[in-house]
Amino acid sequence: MILFDYATEETVVLVIAFLRENRQACAGKDVALLFDDPIKPEKRREILDKMPIDYSKWKAIEVSDDEDDTHPNIDTPSLFRWRHQARLERMAERKQEKDAIEQGKKKAQISLGEIESMLADANLDTKERISLELKKQDMKKQEEEWLQKEQEIADKERLEPWNVDTIGQEKFSQSRINKIAEKKPESSKMTEEEESKRMADYFKKHEVELKGYGALHGFEASKKYLIEHPFLCSEFAASFLTIECLNLAIEEKDEEAGNMAEQCIIIQYLLEMARSLNALATNTTVINTFFKKIGLADPSYMKMFHDEVAAFKDRIMKRAVQKRQEYYSQQEEKDRQERIENSPGGVDPQEVYDSLPVEMRDAFDSREITKLQEVANKMDREVFSYHLQRCIDSGLWIPDANAAQENETEAES
């Protein structure tokens, strides 16, 4: 069985001729040809329709190739240039023809519209109406002729092979020139000590404005305040607001701390946008752009903003709890050292009191010597002596208190 999956017309014709000449040699053999003899256009269309992809349009491409065969005496590059120039001239002529057809069609359509407007007038007499109807028919005929010519041109263009000038067309062209961003002034590297001093000076100089900004509510109030005080758009301001927010949280002023946390995040977002634009955050244009953007932001952006504020508040509150605990621990240690320094034997009275047996502690709380004597009689002598000595060393128990009091009275007199 002979089967041609794909063949040109020339190939098929040659095969058919070969089979005719060798009909007897092929007798009894199963010969199946893809194309009929002769090849009919409808048969070719049927075959192409069955193909998954129509490749026929790629056969109609008119391009010049360095591998094209030319006569040795002909300069190939020059030949290609001449062909290209001739093709461009044909394209220019066709464009002029299309423009003329378009103008003629428009003129006919305009005239037809004017005639229809005139026919709509009810005051026309019969003679004028007949004249206009004849003109209308003439204009319709002209319009149809122009449309037919337009269709003929379109058919010619559709059937014309593609070339290097028509195989691809520019659908749109756009150029963008970015505005030169304001460059941040280059600053020399400073030591950590110098940077800390600058920050402290900034805090001292702008403390009132910083606290005023931190107490604001809402984007509009913040925008107005920052435009009036653009120097607040800095990393130093964000640091001040963070510290102040922490101080308020330590003092358990949660509402004020939460509001200042949001104001701090606004500054941080503004600084981030300025960095992305490579511009100065203190520029009022940048400030206006930021608040315009956040005012028109979609819900997902605002959700991200509020999540950031909530996370910042949470970190501040947790840190405030730690700072309070640290403060209480430090204060407790300070009080303990003071008690030890003031005790006769260098022992913490509170620590001694907490370590006393319950019955001995109750006796001290009652301030009655008889109860303490009862405890001494009941308790093991060594244990009682140990705790009593610690009470003396810490100052909880003063032996011969009456004698000491008499000595103090004599000294005063």
Image: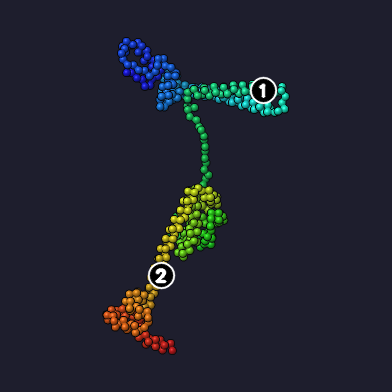
Q: Image point 39% across, 74% down: which residue?
A: 338
Q: Circle 1: is it few (<14), some (14-19), or many (20+) Cα within 10 Å?
A: some
User: In terms of secondary structure, where does tag 1 sit?
Assistant: helix
- Residue 272 position in % (x across, y down): 48, 51
- Residue 392 position in % (x across, y down): 34, 80
Q: Which amino acid, by three-letter code, is at mark 1?
A: Glu
In the displayed structure image, the side of residue 266 where residue 108 appears, left or right:
right
In the picture, the disc for residue 90 is none
- Residue 408 position in % (x across, y down): 40, 86
Q: Image point 53% across, 44% down: which residue?
A: 179
For marks 1 and 2, give the CA distance. 109 Å
Which quadrant is the N terminus positioned in?
Answer: top left
- Residue wearing tag 2: 331
Along the line of sight, the residue nearer the viewer: 260 or 378: 378
216 to 407, vertically: above or below: above
Residue 126 visible at all = yes
